[in-house]
Amino acid sequence: MKKASLKDIAQQAGVSTALVSYVLNGKEKETRVGEVIAQKIRQIAKELNYQPNHLAKSLRSGKTYTIGLIIADISNPFFANIARVVEDEAKKNGYTVIIGSCDEHAEKSWDLLNVLINRQVDGFIIVSCEGSESQVHYLKERNIPFVLLDRHFPEIQTDFVATNNYKASYDAGVHLINSGYSKIGIMAYKSNMYHMVERVRGYRHALRDNHIEFHDSWLKEVHFETMDSEVRTAIDEVLASEQRVDAMIFATYGLAINALKYINELRLKVPSDLAIVSYGQAEVFDLYYCPITYVQQPLEMLGKTAVEFLLEKLKNPEEGMKQILMEAKLIARDSSKAKPTAASA
Amino acid sequence: MKKASLKDIAQQAGVSTALVSYVLNGKEKETRVGEVIAQKIRQIAKELNYQPNHLAKSLRSGKTYTIGLIIADISNPFFANIARVVEDEAKKNGYTVIIGSCDEHAEKSWDLLNVLINRQVDGFIIVSCEGSESQVHYLKERNIPFVLLDRHFPEIQTDFVATNNYKASYDAGVHLINSGYSKIGIMAYKSNMYHMVERVRGYRHALRDNHIEFHDSWLKEVHFETMDSEVRTAIDEVLASEQRVDAMIFATYGLAINALKYINELRLKVPSDLAIVSYGQAEVFDLYYCPITYVQQPLEMLGKTAVEFLLEKLKNPEEGMKQILMEAKLIARDSSKAKPTAASA
DNA sequence: ATAAGTTGCTTAATCGTTTAAACAAAATAT
DNA sequence: ATATTTTGTTTAAACGATTAAGCAACTTAT
């Protein structure tokens, strides 16, 4: 049995497709459809289990009620969860989301962008990856609505929803200092992305404002692609250095996971051998024998707000830019608990 | 600048849209388009950065090159990863995937199904949830192509790609027995789903075949929705029971995570206080101080094969049913290492 | 009784493609 | 010189919906 179309209903009811369309779209009043025939049409539509063809609607209206969500790395549970929030929030508003992960490759991101543009998505929510500035410019030029999520480019004027990474790192640094640690390192991705730069900057300012001299050997920047091996080397180095660290901040979930595995192998104890604060998502860190202190980003809010911004923009394209930085919250746990003082030790 | 359409190109080139369509679809030979004009058309298309409108194409052809992927629970990393594999494999074949998670609710699954049917997806890949049999029947009746993934209903004839759960659990049981454990419990979801039933059945047969008497208190079935609290109670019970277990099998990732958190709180040592084997995904288990033995499902193969089956079905709808059970692999690690024997203890 | 307004419906264009069929002009065959 | 074939192009219908405009047939007002 083929799918029923407006035409099928019209034929069975002995009327034109226009009437059927009016009735099924609840426009009977404005368009003065007879009560009797309206009932009949509704009846037949139900019998035939009529489902409107979304393609045809979209082609006509120019709106697909579809959002493209491009995510830098879906295997990161933080992003996976954000994707979920975005999807839920969009569905509440009658939108469908098509998700794509570019795995931190600008090229893949271009592909995704084009596929989704061809599919006529109404707009985009994008977690940008390194080197994707041109894509953002492209969207601006083509006047395609979009909102940047979690990561943004300060030198490009766009809508965005992100975390105040500077503040989050600053807080993480201060927290460690207040807990008695003084040789604090940070591991981040080698990247010019603003969010990453900010995470390092916040950390350095926390040291500076607390009169701790920063040592170059404390900053470890590793490449995303070769993270597995580079993290190990980096850990080796910060531990072997003359200025051996007693605490580490991990700027991403992936770095923390890899580092923790290695730290386990080395049989180092957290926090006595090394205190830890990490960005990232909570559940996994709970599993660790010593719960990990982490920077809790307002995941739900980030996702919801991004959808909200985009939908507003779709309704009213002329509205001004919306930009928001949300505050993260440091969840202090055992991995950064106060260092026993010389006196008590 | 509005998007360029076939018409725009046709106008600029001074020809009909038909010619443009022929040329841009590489049908110049069959349809005998002049070489000169063909060049011109290609040139103009490039200049205008022509991107075909997928909606219009789909409306005309009846094919959207879109697959609906309905997943029981996207927050489970196993499924998140399967989703990724499906997406990649589909993209390789020119298909786009729309993912939806029903969070183990049949009702939500119905919604998703309808939304995606309206959007004219060409077919479905579905990780079914409890109580969704009627949906499967519906798809069959309406002749909508689909493949069940990871979970299936033995009483309904469908295509499916799944793991041999019976065998996997059997192996897990035997492994524990061979490692010297004899009081082995299992924690599963309270469910009539075949995959879950099979996981329990395999475990019981492993005991039976090794002459270990099964005790009712060893089987703990908890509800998905209230897992957090029920897991704790269950753990308390298996430990307090007269037949206190010395090993546990967790039938899902979520159960294991929750149980491990609680086991940590109780300061129990794995495996000396309790040995563990779990279904689920690897990375997280690595973080545990004692790496967790787990059942490694052929994730990549499952996803790829599901896509393959579906695409074949889309090409040739009349082809016979394809059903496959893939073998899982037990990855033995410290959480189930051989128990010190009485002699050596 | 005629003009004006209301009611209930149909017609036809449109969105951007594809593609069978028709057609004219040029080339080849008879 | 006429018939046939080949070549290069256009026309128009179709996919499934929406919607402005048009058109009868009534009803009401004057």
Image (cartoon, coloured by chain):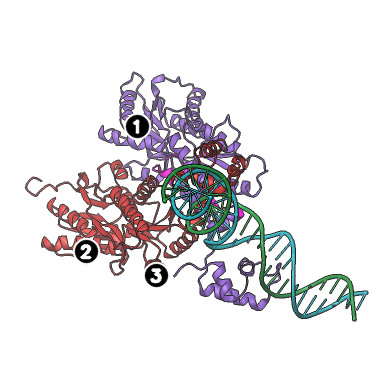
Chain colours: A red, B purple, C cyan, D green
Residues at marks 3 and 1, CA–CA distance in whole angstroms: 50 Å
**Along the line of sight, which residue is nearer the eye, A81 or A50?**
A50
- Label 3 environment density (alpha carbons within 10 Å; few <14, some 14–19, many ≥20): few
Label 3 sits on what residue type? Glu
B317 relative position to A22: left or right: right
Which mark is drawn over residue A201?
2
Q: Position of residue B262 (x, y in %)?
A: 29, 33
**Along the line of sight, which residue is nearer the eye, A325 or C28?**
C28
Residues at marks 2 and 3, CA–CA distance in whole angstroms: 32 Å
Residue at mark 3: A141
- Please identify the quarter of the rendering in which residue B216 is found: top left
Determine if marks 2 and 1 fall on one subunit: no
A97 relative position to D15: left or right: left
Residue at mark 1: B227
Q: Position of residue B132 (x, y in %)?
A: 49, 33
Label 1 sits on what residue type? Met
